[in-house]
Image: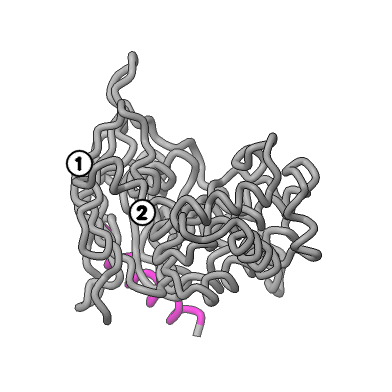
Amino acid sequence: MSSPLLSVRDLSVAFHTDDGVVNAVNDISFEVHPGETLAVVGESGSGKSVSAMALMRLLPSSARIQGTIEFDGRDLLGLSPRDMRRLQGNEIAMIFQDPMTALNPVFTVGNQLVEAIRIHNPKVSKRAARERAASMLALVGIPDADERLDNYPHEFSGGMRQRAMIAMGISNEPKLLIADEPTTALDVTIQAQVIEVIKRAQEATGAAMILITHDLGLVAGVAERVQVMYGGRLFETGPTETIYYRSRNPYTRGLISSIPSATARTERRLAPIPGAPPSAINPPKGCVFRPRCQHATDECFTEPGLRRLDEAALHQSRCHYAEQLGEMDTAASGSRT
């Protein structure tokens, strides 16, 4: 495998508030390789977006960031604000999760796309930048792209605004594209279309991608690898097929069990995860998923570390009983045959 484009080591993010310290992200480590798609999934409040904003250096000054973030051989946390701005939107681009408010309502879509191009390429003429902006809109499936450049955001539907945000994200052919909940507030038909557009845009630019979502059902045909976050911690990571069919973590299994199936031959009730996500200020003792886990025992009052489940450490799970979950699956499979 090639050298990683992005390498994150022991990343932690905390915020000081009047109520106490909010530990939003706790010691997560991962890599993204050139051209790869990594999906980051988990419930709201699990630390997905905060970790992405830390990568982009877009968190407020009140955030305390610790760890190492290396991108293409550069230490992002050590860059000056000026050098970081040269990367933002150019080598690392982000599709924000709310297309309704991410675009400035008082400028045309074309003006905003042209600005995104020329701010990193000042030698490009306005005419050339407009031509490129039109080609980006066409690439993401907006008809009559040259004419639609003169529309304001309110003249675009929600799905079209999200496509415009994707066009803006890929306009400078970034090496890494971060898509933060790109299908939020869109109906299921538009969701599928947006995911297809992102895939097509990624293929056109060759960018690596981090796809952040709370919906495991969206990532099956998009990502090579999945990492599952809960309570600001990395709970399971592995190849997509492994996570879907051979998960070794109760939380991941809970997420999968709550996904409706369109191909199931028999009716089955969805199995929601009981309870609520943990407090980031006062998390439960031991495993943060313990109060909601049907497999919890007294040992779970001690926090588990990530356990390697294969020689290459491609599949890892934060659970004291990760290996036993595999044995339970084997036993259940044997009893059915």
Which image quarter: residue 145?
Answer: bottom right
- Which residue reaches farthest bottom? 337
**Residues in magenta, as a range:** 321-336
Query: Left or right: 126 with respect to 10?
Result: right
Which type of secondary structure does the marked residue at label 1 adopt? strand
**In front of the other: 288 or 270:** 288
Q: Position of residue 103 (x, y in %)?
A: 63, 42
For mark 2, what is the residue?
87
Query: In the image, residue 323 lies at what x, y percent?
Result: 27, 67
Helix, strand or loop status at disc 2: helix
Predominant secondary structure, magenta span: helix
- The residue lying furthest to the top in this view is 18
Q: Nearer the viewer, residue 59 or 283?
A: 59
On the rendered structure, is 200 left or right of 74?
A: right
Going from the N terminus, do you reach mark 1 or mark 2 first? 1
Amino acid on which the number 2 mark rests in the picture: Leu
Residue at 40 percent across and 73 percent down: it is 36
**What residue lies at 27% left-to-right and 70% top-to-bottom?**
4
Residue in the image at 51% along x and 54% along y: 118
Circles 1 and 2, Cβ within 8 Å, touching? The answer is no
Residue 40: in magenta span = no
Q: Which of the pair 245/320 is nearer the observer? A: 245
